[in-house]
Amino acid sequence: MIRHIDFDGIENFRDFGGYDTVSGRKVKSGLLYRSANHAYASDADLDRMRKLGLAAIVDLRRTEERTREPSKRWPGFGAAVVENDILSDHADWIETMRGVEVNAQWFFDDAMSYYRTAPFQARHIDLFRRYFLTLADTPGPIVVHCAAGKDRTGIICALTHHLLGVNSDDILADYLLTNDEARMARKIAFLGPWLRDTVDKTVDEAGLRVAVSVNAAYLETAVSVIGKAHGSLDNYLTEVLGVDAGLRERLQDRLLA
C-alpha cells in the first residue's frame, strides 16, 4: 500500500495502518495517520485533511511549539483536539542549542537522551493516555503529530502497533519510513534556514540530515528503558498509560479487520 501522502506544506504525512498482526487480523487502513505539524498547511492541504474525514487530531507538541507554529484548520473544523500545557522535562531546542556547537553528533546525542526519558515524562504520559482513549472512542480517522512527526509521534505509533499485534520488524520498518530519501532534501532545505532564523545556528548538511532523520537505535533505546522500568511494553501500557484489558479489546475491535 502507499503510505506517504503528499501535502504541500505538511511533512511526513502517512497512513500507519495496513499491517498484518500476530492474531491473523490486519490493522485497518484509513483510520491511523501520523504527520509533522500543520502550521504550514496550504488551503489544498486543509481541504485534503477535511476530505480524509479526520475526527480527532492529537498534537504532542509543547505549548511553546504550538505558539511558535500554530496549527491551521479547515473551514467548519469540528474535529476533537488533544493537547496539553504540562511542562516538559526536556528543554526546547531553542534553549539547548545556546552556547554549544550544533552538528551531527549533537543531534544524535540529543535524540538518544530524549528517547531515554520521553516515555516517562508526565506530559507524554498524559497525552499518550488520552491518545489511546480518543483512539478507542472516536468514530473516525485520527492523525497524531508533533513538530517533525518522527520522535514523539514515532514512539506512540510504535506503541500502537505493538498493542495491535504488529510484529517488531514491521514496527521498526514503519518507524524508519521517516527517512524517505525523496523527501529528505525538502526537509533539510526547510530546517537549515529555520535553525538560522530561530536559534541563530548554521548547521552543515550532515548535521541537518541527522536532525530530520530517525535511527533504529532511538526506538530501541525507548523500548529498552521501558522494559527495564516496567518489565515489558505491555506492562507499561497497562500500568502507566492505563490501557487495561477492556480498553485494549475496544482498540482491537475498532482498528483490526
Image: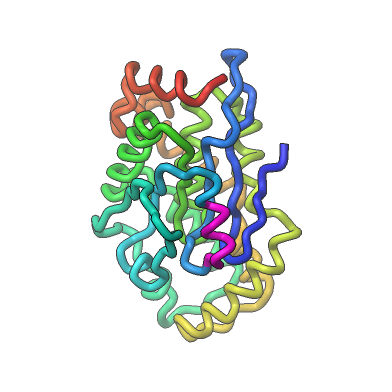
Q: Position of residue 61 (x, y in %)?
A: 38, 58
Main structural element of the magenta stretch: helix, strand or loop?
helix
| Residue 117 showing in the rendered view | no
The residue that appears at 69% across and 63% down in the rendered structure is: 184
Query: Is residue 67 at least partly visible in the picture?
Result: yes
Residue 218 location (% of width, % of height): 54, 48
Assess whether residue 42 is covered by the magenta stretch.
yes
Task: Please state the extent of the stretch shown in magenta in the rendering.
Answer: 41-49
Check the image and name the residue furthest to the left. 86
Residue at position x 63%, y 40% from top?
174
For the image, the number of numbered tags is: 0
**Residue 117 at x, y percent in the picture:** 37, 49
55 to the left or right of 207: left
Vertical comparison of 55 with 178: above or below: above
Q: Residue furthest right?
A: 182
Residue occupying image coordinates x 36% and y 65%: 66
The quadrant of the picture occupied by the N terminus is: top right
The image quarter in which residue 44 lies:
bottom right
**Furthest residue to the front?**
76
Q: In which quarter of the image is the C terminus?
A: top right
- Decide which of 35, 158 is in the foreground and name it: 35
Name the one closer to the observer, 228 or 155: 155
Asked whether 249 falls inside the magenta stretch, the response is: no
